[in-house]
């Protein structure tokens, strides 16, 4: 994908925090500011099935990233995304202000009300109203009404399959339960094992 | 605006937003450590050298920053095996504390070929043996030393391993702070992207796991003569009764008898340790640590918590496990407790 302009040594990966997605990518997109590097492609409302995102969306560590439009119903070729009803506000780490929203969707195979739920999950990042208003007003302060329609409808989607998730995420940065067992054994070791 | 677009690493180059240093174990060993050992230049000097005896973990955190992106882990090169002048033990003491190895070293594979080992260490504040365990964890990676493997063919070893043996001494380390699952799950971590459903599930699993673990350790503690018999009996009602497949340590009825508690406890404690050790060891040998979480839950379902799980695969496996440990502890503790009834 847009990787061509990112030339980093091994070990560097696209692991944006929620905040980075909102501040660096979504906010700049909405405000029509250039994104360097421009790694997240714009898939608009193309009805790709999640497994077809490879090669189209930015892929990293079993996750796919793309820009899209806010929409009430995301119907793909073979199924649809259904909201899980979970909305998480995203806060700025520096100011604690609410900068965006993260919504969760599950992918269902089949026709709309009767599809079969899959393991595919989508997180949809949108700007919170205040921040999208300020972003669009900054870019076009005089064309307020138009900018609202045009720019605040952008979202960033992060799609992944739940099972694969563990493969890349931890890679040692988290102690496994087994390590925890060992740690606890160490404690007991000192306290109560007969020498 | 361009300022916050990119981050300089040691004033040389830049890491764009959204990207972070998140190497695989394979990359750490095969790329970074190999280059270091071979004295090759590494693009973007991202991994610093650290004298482990001189820096505390929180200083390392400062020194090994990569740009200004939020980090959950920090990487550095260090010299392997600095021994105390008097002995063979590795000196990993700092001014404020010391690093202590825990568990067993894990073999790192690349394309099913063994490429190195990982040691896990914990930072304790204070001086051994009275140090206070902290949340700082270190993974120390070393290239495979082959010493044991090629022991029998020294000549080949010298030729093939010549490069490695003369350069041994560098390890690559990653430190991070252990997360507390009961507090907030990752706020600004790169892995914060887990879905809510997933997070809640894993959260719940962990919760269950640790609950079971806690029980297990309470249980073991109580059987190592630290607690009174009636404490054990408290566990009996809600925990022990269900753990039918556990090697029996102390029968629920035994407290009514007037057996000499000390003998029973000593034996039970020791054997129970062996059993747990076996359990853990067989997991280590048999499967990767990542798999462990998964199996673990089922195992405790079948063995401790539920007793009635329908998951055959795991049930079978865990039965084997326990019978293995039962056999290998020579049934001595079963004898003890059976004799008590």
Image (spheres, coloured by chain):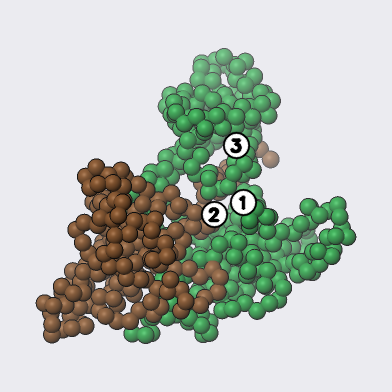
Chain colours: A brown, B green
Taking depth in this image into account, of B244 and A128 the one nearest to the observer is: A128
Image height of B313 relative to B40, above or below = above
Image height of A172 relative to B210, above or below = below
Q: Residue at x 62, y 39 (%)?
A: B282
Residue B285 position within the rendered picture, expressed as x and y whole percent measured from the top left: 64, 43
- Quote the CA–CA distance across marks 2 and 3: 24 Å
Q: In the rendered image, which quarter contains the C terminus of chain A?
A: top right
- Quote the CA–CA distance across marks 3 and 1: 16 Å
Marks 2 and 3 belong to one chain: yes
Visible residue check, residue B76? yes
Q: Which residue is mark 3?
A: B279
Can you tell which mark lies on residue B133?
2
Q: Earlier in the sequence, mark 3 or mark 1?
A: 1
Taking depth in this image into account, of B138 and B155 the one nearest to the observer is: B155
Can you tell which mark lies on residue B102?
1
Q: Residue at x 37, y 48 (%)?
A: A119
Q: Residue at x 63, y 24 (%)?
A: B333
């Amino acid at each position: 994908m847009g990787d061509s302009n990112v030339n980093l040594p091994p070990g560097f990966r696209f692991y944006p925090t929620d905040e980075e997605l909102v501040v660096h990518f979504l906010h700049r997109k909405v405000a029509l500011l250039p994104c360097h590097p421009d790694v997240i492609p714009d898939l608009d409302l193309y009805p790709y099935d999640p497994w077809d995102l490879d090669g189209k969306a930015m892929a990293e560590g079993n996750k796919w990233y793309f820009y899209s439009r806010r929409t009430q119903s995301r119907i793909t070729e073979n199924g649809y995304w259904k909201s899980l009803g979970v909305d998480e506000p995203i806060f700025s780490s520096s100011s604690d202000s609410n900068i965006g929203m993260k919504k969760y969707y599950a992918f269902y195979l089949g026709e709309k009300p009767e599809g079969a739920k899959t393991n595919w999950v989508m997180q949809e990042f949108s700007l919170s109203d205040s921040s999208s208003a300020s972003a669009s007003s900054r870019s076009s302060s005089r064309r307020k009404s138009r900018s609202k329609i045009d720019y605040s409808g952008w979202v960033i989607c992060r799609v992944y399959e739940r099972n694969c998730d563990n493969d890349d995420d931890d890679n040692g940065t988290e102690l496994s339960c087994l390590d925890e067992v060992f740690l606890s054994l160490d404690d007991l070791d000192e306290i109560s094992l007969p020498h | 605006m361009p300022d916050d677009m990119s981050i300089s690493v040691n004033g040389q180059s830049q890491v764009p937003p959204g990207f972070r240093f998140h190497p695989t174990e394979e990359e750490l060993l095969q790329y970074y450590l190999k280059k270091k050992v071979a004295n090759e230049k590494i693009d973007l000097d991202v991994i610093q050298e650290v004298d482990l005896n001189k820096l505390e973990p929180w200083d390392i955190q400062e020194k090994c920053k990569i740009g200004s992106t939020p980090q959950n882990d920090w990487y550095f090169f260090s010299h392997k095996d600095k021994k105390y002048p008097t002995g063979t033990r590795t000196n990993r003491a700092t001014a404020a504390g010391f690093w202590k190895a825990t568990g067993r070293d894990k073999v790192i594979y690349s394309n099913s070929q063994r490429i190195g080992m990982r040691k896990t260490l914990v930072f304790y504040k204070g001086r051994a043996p009275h140090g206070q365990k902290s949340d700082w964890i270190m993974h120390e990676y070393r290239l495979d030393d082959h010493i044991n493997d090629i022991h029998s063919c020294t000549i080949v070893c010298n030729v093939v391993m010549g490069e490695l043996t003369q350069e041994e001494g560098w390890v690559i380390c990653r430190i991070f702070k252990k997360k507390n699952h009961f507090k907030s799950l990752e706020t600004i971590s790169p892995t914060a992207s887990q879905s809510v459903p997933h997070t809640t599930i894993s959260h719940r699993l962990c919760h269950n796991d640790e609950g079971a673990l806690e029980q297990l350790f309470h249980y073991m503690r109580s059987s190592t003569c630290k607690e009174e018999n009636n404490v054990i009996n408290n566990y009996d009602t809600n925990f022990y009764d269900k753990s039918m497949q556990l090697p029996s340590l102390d029968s629920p009825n035994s407290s009514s008898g007037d057996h000499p508690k000390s003998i029973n406890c000593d034996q039970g404690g020791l054997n129970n340790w062996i059993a747990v050790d076996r359990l853990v060891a067989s997991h280590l040998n048999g499967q990767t640590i990542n798999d462990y979480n998964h199996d673990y839950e089922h195992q405790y379902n079948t063995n401790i918590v539920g007793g009635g799980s329908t998951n055959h695969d795991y049930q079978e496996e865990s039965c084997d496990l326990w019978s293995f440990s039962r056999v290998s502890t020579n049934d001595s503790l079963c004898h003890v407790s059976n004799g008590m009834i």
